[in-house]
Amino acid sequence: MSFLSYPGTAEQKQLLETAARLADRFAERAARYDWEGHFPIENFKDLHEAGYLTLSLPRELGGQGASLLDLVHAQYRLAQGDASTALVVTMHLMHSGRLVEGRGELPPVIKQLCRDIVEHGAMINSAVSEPATGSPSRGGRPQTTARRQPDGSWRIDGRKTFTTGSHALSYFIVGCSIEDAGGAEAGLPALKSERGNFLVPKSTEGVRIEDTWNTVGMRETGSNDLILEGVHLGVEAYLDEQLPVIPSIQTKQGVWGLVLASVYLGIAQAARDEAVRFARSRRPNSLKQQSIATVPHIQDKIGRIEVLLFESKASLFGLAEHYTEDNSNVEPALVGAVKYLATNNAIEIIDLSMRVAGAASLALSSPLQRYYRDIRAGLHNPPMDDVALAALAKRTLEDPTEPAK
């Protein structure tokens, strides 16, 4: 199979039909929610009812067991309707999938999480960025602190920023610095790390959302601040103990970056479709009732859009298919390269699309101005451009098969 022949099975066709139906429904609401800056909670109710939130869970846990290739195609289609909603869903699918992927028997706390997703539409995302440190991908130490108590339980205090999907989430994976507040004196084993990840239910006392998200792009993602004040959690909340790191699994999980890239590819596709629609329908009297689709410089711009879009699709869907068939040798540098390509090509595609539509693209009634704002968020989702390019350069420069001259 290649991306040109997807979907190839009845199940894949049904998945894309579901994604298309939801995308079209969300597109009707997107302009209003974007303008108001409100979180589209009804979208996530629709996603739950469609079973979409279980895509990355295996069938034995009640999920749909979608492959990586299925996920990137589905999210690419969903993002064409509402990129903010698709970005929130991507984070949920990514983190729920990572928690269960490649493991045998799961601890009770993770099984319960999966039941909540399947039965109640629960959603999960990580909460790792902070005001002082920014993205943890830059190496900052969390100021949010988890202190181990004498009975082995934990107390967490801190503030997290950019908690995407905050109002729809039931669980947070919170990155913390770890301190011992009496555990060692009580005879508990010594702590093995200075930082770790904790599973925090939203319903826990001391957990609250502060509505701080007010940006020009991805306005509907509800990426607000998560406040944790004296949050008391049991021993089972410490995820690094519940799910020890397995290097082979950790390496394979780098492919989830392709699902993120599919959101930005979806925005580019939506912009292209709007540019084509506008070119076909715009008939100024200077052209004697012909559409601007007959004008050479418009055709040139549409042609350039098609080349950029084809390049992004071939790279993203091709690598997703490769890893779906064999994820034994995942190269993070290639995943980062695809994300870089999809995002930066999308920026150029949207610019060309707005040039096709001209000043009409700036009207608030035009979706192009929303795509223009939303696509900028892709530059700030890890890996950032400099990190992606550095990893790709390092892969090349350290390749022993490259001849030295």
Image (spheres, helix red, strand yellow):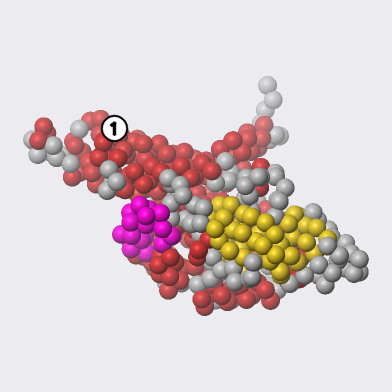
x then y, percent, for residue 19: 39, 63
Can residue 15 be seen here? The reply is no
- The residue that mark 1 highlights is 300
**Which residue occupies 28% across, 40% down?**
361
Q: Quadrant of the C terminus?
A: top right
The mark tally for this picture is 1
x then y, percent, for residue 116: 56, 75
- Residue interval drawn in magenta: 22-40
Residue 23 located within the stretch drawn in magenta: yes
State which quadrant residue 398 falls in. top right
State which quadrant residue 300 falls in. top left
Q: Is residue 255 above or below residue 379?
A: below
**Which residue occupies 68% across, 66% down?**
231
Nearer-the-camera pick, 216 or 95: 216
Can residue 347 be seen here? The reply is yes
Could you tell whether 197 is left or right of 79 in the image? right
Could you tell whether 160 is left or right of 234 in the image? left
Residue 295 located within the stretch drawn in magenta: no
**Which residue occupies 70% across, 73% down?**
107
By secondary structure, the bulk of the magenta-drawn segment is best described as: helix
Could you tell whether 191 is left or right of 392 in the image? right
x then y, percent, for residue 245: 74, 59
**Which residue occupies 84% across, 69% down?**
150
Q: Farthest residue toward the top? A: 405
Q: Quick one: SS at disc 1?
A: helix
**For the residue carrying disc 1, how many other residues have a C-alpha within 10 Å: few (<14), some (14-19), or many (20+)?**
few
